[in-house]
Amino acid sequence: MANPYPLLKEMRQHGKPFWDDELKMYLAPNHVDANAVFRNKSLGRIYKPRTPEFEWGTFNWLHSDSILDSEPPKHTRLRALVAKAFNRQKIEGLRPDIERITTELLDAISEKVRNGSPFDLIADFAEPLPVKVIAALLGFPSSDEYLLRPWSQSIVKMYEVNPPLQHQEEAKQAANEFAEYVRRLMEARKLKPGSDLISDLAAVEENGEKLNAQELIATCVLLLNAGHEASVNAFGNGMVSALQRPDQADLLLTRPQEIAITAVEEFLRFDAPLQMFDRTATEDTQLGGVEIKAGEKIAALIGSANRDESVFERAEEMDLTRDPNPHIGFGAGIHFCLGGPLARLEMSISLPALCERFPKMELASEPVRRPTFVLRGYESVAISTG
Ligand code: HEM
């Protein structure tokens, strides 16, 4: 987990997908195959309900009724409904809000480091920023924002391989609490609508039979979780990698505005916050020269694909000016990240703002990794401001 890249490089030497006995699925470490996993119509995101059903009820439907874990025609219906809120123009309209939130967070950090103590890049900046932005977009009460991250973190513990019993209990409980909270919020918005996305979605249930209550709650919960979980780690992983490399740190801290756009893409490529996603074959299919039988699984190894030396020159080097940069950090095909434009806008505003405010930033100590592979990120990153 500290550094999976040497092993991933070995995996790419296979030249094609291969069966992993421990994970009980094929792994696709090369760019061309990982990309094909996302685009293959015979491979679907099929949610396998957790059993026993009576215990896992809410956790199960929060997934099976969400955009991410459904397939056409249901996926098409759910995605069409929220896609409008996430188009480039709408997202660009959030720019003033993102700038304001960025400045507020930076002001708080300036206050904190006044006596020379370091700040935590994750807790003080990378985490609250996307949480506040997605909460504002959905109309989630700002006084309850502190609930989002723990709920989300408990739920995603189930995404790791063989989660321990305690994590399973936490995930179940978080799913129950989160869904119940959102259900009540939607009821309140039906009575007193605002101009936010939750009100819009609540109205859909009232007006047409397009979506049922469970699908709406599952959609809101997914947006609230997906809307910050990967963004926190993309920012943290990218900043740590850049600060560990004197040439890239210098570039970032001296020309942040100029290189912001390419730097964000390189953050997403170099140390991907989401390392893998799997699919299940709905019928026998072929991929990269391998036969996948109906019911078998194959995973796209995003972090590995993003380091594929047949696609990226000097793939193992971080280059914040890299262009073009065809990484697959946002996936591909019908589940391609809906929040891509939002994540890009957030980072392209917050990254240069942070660097301009603290041009002498350095890692104050060894950053602490989270012990997870699929969602790759740091627990805390102490930064000194010089
Ligand atoms: C740097 C930040 C982000 C990264 C790296 C990222 C990555 C991804 C990836 C790889 C997928 C595809 C999963 C699959 O195909 O199995 C995905 C889907 C999704 N993402 Fe993101 N994401 C980010 C930020 C966001 C944000 C800010 C939102 C805002 C709401 C968001 C919402 C979604 C949704 C709703 C889906 C499901 C789309 C569908 O199934 O049709 N993501 N994301």
Image (cartoon, helix red, strand yellow):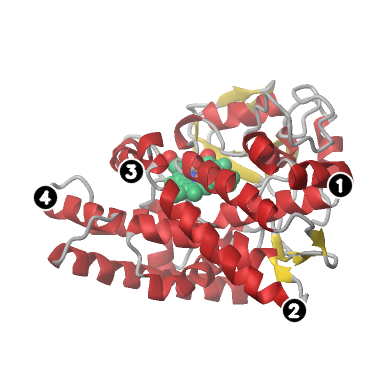
Q: CA distance from mark 3 to mark 1?
A: 38 Å
Mark 4 / mark 2, whichever is N-terminal: 2
Marks 4/2 in contact by CB < 8 Å: the verdict is no
Q: Is residue 274 visible?
A: yes
Name the front one of labels 4 and 1.
1
Give the x, y percent position of residue 49.
45, 57
Quarter of the image with the N terminus is bottom right
Res. 115 mark: 2
Q: Amino acid at mark 4?
A: Asn
Q: Residue at x 40, y 74 (%)?
A: 144
Q: Is mark 2 within 8 Å of ligand 1?
A: no
Mark 4 highlights which residue?
207
Name the quadrant containing residue 90. Answer: top left
> Tag 3's secondary structure?
helix
Instruction: Find residue 199 and name its label.
Output: none
Q: Nearer the viewer, residue 158 or 216?
A: 216
Q: Which mark is residue 245?
A: 1
**Quarter of the image containing the C terminus?**
bottom right
Depicted 269 relative to depicted 201: above or below: above
- N-terminal of the pair, mark 3 or mark 2, is 3
**Which residue is located at x 38 percent, y 59 percent?**
136
Relative to residue 254, is residue 159 depicted above or below?
below
Give the mark nearer the N terminus: 3 vs 1.
3
